[in-house]
Image (tube, rainbow, N blue to C red):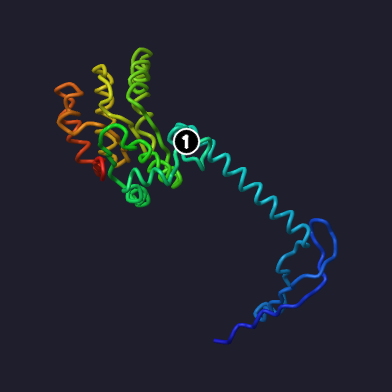
Amino acid sequence: MSEPNPVIETIAELECPWCRRRFEGKLLRFDMAFMGRTVNLSADPLCPACRRLAEQQRAAEEEARRQQREAEWAHVCPVKYRLTTEADGETDLDHLRLRVPILGDLIEWANTDRKRGLLLRGETGMCKTRAMFRVVRRLWERGMSCQVWTASRFEAECQAARDNHQLGSFLERQLRPRVWFFDDVGKMRWLPTTEGVFFDIVETRMRDQKIILVTTNDPGPVLEKRFSDNVGPPLVRRLRDHCDCYVFEQGK
C-alpha cells in the first residue's frame, strides 16, 4: 500500500468570510491523488479579530447554557441543599465533605449504571439530605429525569389526587422519572390511601429496576411501626432488598 501524501502547510493571503478583510493565515494543501486534484483548506478561515469575536460568542453561549441548566436544577433542588457554586445555594461542598466522609463513595455510586436504589439512614442533623442531593445532582447531570418528594407534600398531593378522582394518573406520574427521591420516609403518619400509593410506587419501581433514593431517621423495626401493620413490614423488606444502605453515625 502506498504511503499517503503529506499535508503541506503554507502561509497565504486569505479572505475572512465574516468581515471580508484580507489577512495572512495558514493554508493546508492536501494532494488527493486518487481524485486527481489538490485540495486547499485554511486552518482557520477567520481573521484574528473575528476569531476573538467567535470565541467570545462561544463563551457567552456556554454561559447562557450553564445558567439555563442551573435554573432547571433550581426546580429540582431546594436552595438550602444547592452548593454555593450553584444558583443561590447555601451548601459548602468542602464543609459537606468533612461532615460526610463517604460523600465521594456516594457520588461514585451515582456514576455507575444502577438498577438498585440507595437508602441513607441516621439521626437528624447528619447531612443525609444534603449528601443525597449530591447523588441526585450527579444522576441529573447524566441526563436522568428526577422527582423529589417530602412526606408532607406527598401526603397533600396524593390526597388531592384522590379527592379529584385522579389517583391513577398521580401514581403513573411517579413511575415515569428515572430517579425518584423521597426525603425523610417515616417523618409523619399518612392516611391509608397515601400508604397504599407509596407502597405501590416502591413495588413497581423495584420491579421495573428504576432508581429509588430514600433518606430516613429510623432503623427498620422503627420504620415499620410508622406504617400500618399490613404495609410496614413488606415495605421495609422491599426497601432493604432494592436499596444499597448506608448508615450515618456520629463520628463516622
Left or right: 164 in relation to 186: right
Left or right: 235 in relation to 160: left
**Quadrant where the N terminus is found in the figure:** bottom right
Q: Position of residue 12 (x, y in %)?
A: 80, 74
**Quadrant where the C terminus is found in the figure:** top left
Q: Which residue is situated farthest in the top direction here?
A: 163
Residue with the mark numbered 1: 90
- What amino acid type is highlighted by mark number 1? Glu
Depth check: 162 or 168 in front? 162
Classify mark 1: helix, strand or loop: loop
For disc 1, the neighbor class at 10 Å (few under 14, some 14 to 19, many from 20) is some
Number of marks in picture: 1
Q: Position of residue 163 (x, y in %)?
A: 35, 12
Q: Position of residue 38 (x, y in %)?
A: 72, 77
Which quadrant of the figure has residue 50? bottom right
Q: Residue at x 73, y 69 (%)?
A: 42
Depth check: 24 or 36 in front? 24
Depth check: 22 or 55 in front? 55
Which quadrant of the figure has residue 37? bottom right
Q: Which residue is situated farthest in the front direction here?
A: 251
Q: Which residue is situated farthest in the bottom direction here?
A: 2
Which quadrant of the figure has residue 208? top left
User: Looking at the image, is 44 positioned above or below residue 152?
Assistant: below
Q: Residue at x 38, y 38 (%)?
A: 130
User: Looking at the image, is 164 positioned above or below residue 66?
Assistant: above
Q: Position of residue 170 (x, y in %)?
A: 37, 24
